[in-house]
Amino acid sequence: MVFLLAASGKDPAALNIVENLLSLHPFKPEKARGNLEIHEAGNVKLAILEGEAVKAENLDEVFPEAEAVAFASRHESESLQATLTVHVPGNLTGKAAHGGKPRQLAYAWPQRMRLALEVLSRLAPEGFKVSLEATHHGPTGLKKPVWFVEIGSSLEQWTNREAGRAVAEALWVSLTGLPEGTAAVGFGGGHYAPKHSKVTLEGRYVVGHIFPKYALASGLDRELIAQAFHKTYGGCSVAVVDWKGLQGEVRRNLLSLLEGLEVEEVVRV
């Protein structure tokens, strides 16, 4: 299998991560593809993008041989919390302010996301929070599985060498490690997903797409939820629900919807 690592040349966190990747692993320059700077190490290609990662909708056309795409990126939040995060891209509402299309989800590969999360948990610098995040932003149209591993949430963290090393290793292992676990779609809780992270790190289930409480509060989008199960690599028929992280009525409606979708197992956490 050939895998692609992608990083925006406009993103200080991504450049920090790339610098670590190039120093830690045997990448060698490869012939450019269009305006993309390319490096290669074994079956892993590293592409430096001209534009923002969230708008990189055509990478599977430029790299048709790639089985999956892992993005090195920054994470932004108003809290400025120091974070190392993993998530699948996708837009859970009718808005697409940060790339992709409204109500469109990328393909998830939860088992490889867990590999990244495990490395982050082991290598995170002191003071950095490690977590899965809810599904958000683009790109959403790639035909291959996609995940982001990010440094948050301000320039001080984006350029932190130790954080860059942790994410570089997480990305590398997510592509070269052995993916294991039973794939699941997560529901409930906030944007950061500590319960889904705990399940993913400790149990047999590995969570990819996550629908947080705020995305379910105004109603359940059956097609979008069905899309999350359909767009999980290798198939998925398990839901992991943050039970206290949803209001009772939403929870009841969700269980009914999942039953209608013939989801085989609902795990309460």
Image: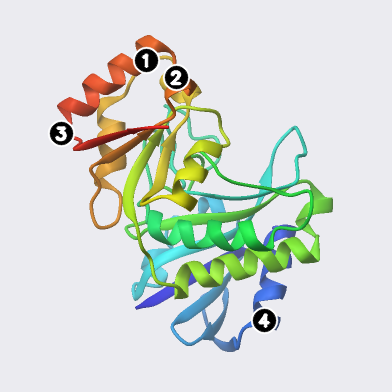
User: Mark 1 falls on what kind of element?
Assistant: helix
Left or right of 34: which side holds 141?
A: left
**Amino acid at dot 4:** Leu
Mark toward the viewer: 2 or 4: 2
The residue drawn where x is 48% and y is 62% is 115
Residue 138 visible at all: yes
The residue closer to the viewer here, 253 or 215, is: 253
The residue closer to the viewer here, 202 or 181, is: 202
Residue 59, label in figure: none
Q: Callout 1: 10 Å neighbours few (<14), some, many (20+)?
A: some
Instruction: Answer with mark 3 or mark 4, whichever residue precedes in sequence.
Output: 4
Q: Tell me whether circle 2 and circle 4 mark residues in contact (CB < 8 Å).
A: no
The residues tagged by marks 3 and 1 sit, at their Cα atoms, a distance apart of 18 Å
Q: Callout 3: 10 Å neighbours few (<14), some, many (20+)?
A: few
The residue closer to the viewer here, 117 or 11, is: 117
Read off the residue under disc 4: 24
**Amino acid at dot 1:** Val
The residues tagged by marks 1 and 4 sit, at their Cα atoms, a distance apart of 47 Å
**Amino acid at dot 3:** Glu
Residue 262, label in figure: 3
Read off the residue under disc 2: 246
Q: Tell me whether circle 1 and circle 2 mark residues in contact (CB < 8 Å).
A: yes
Query: Outermost residue toward the top?
Result: 249
Query: Considering the image in quadrants, where does the N terminus appear?
Result: bottom left
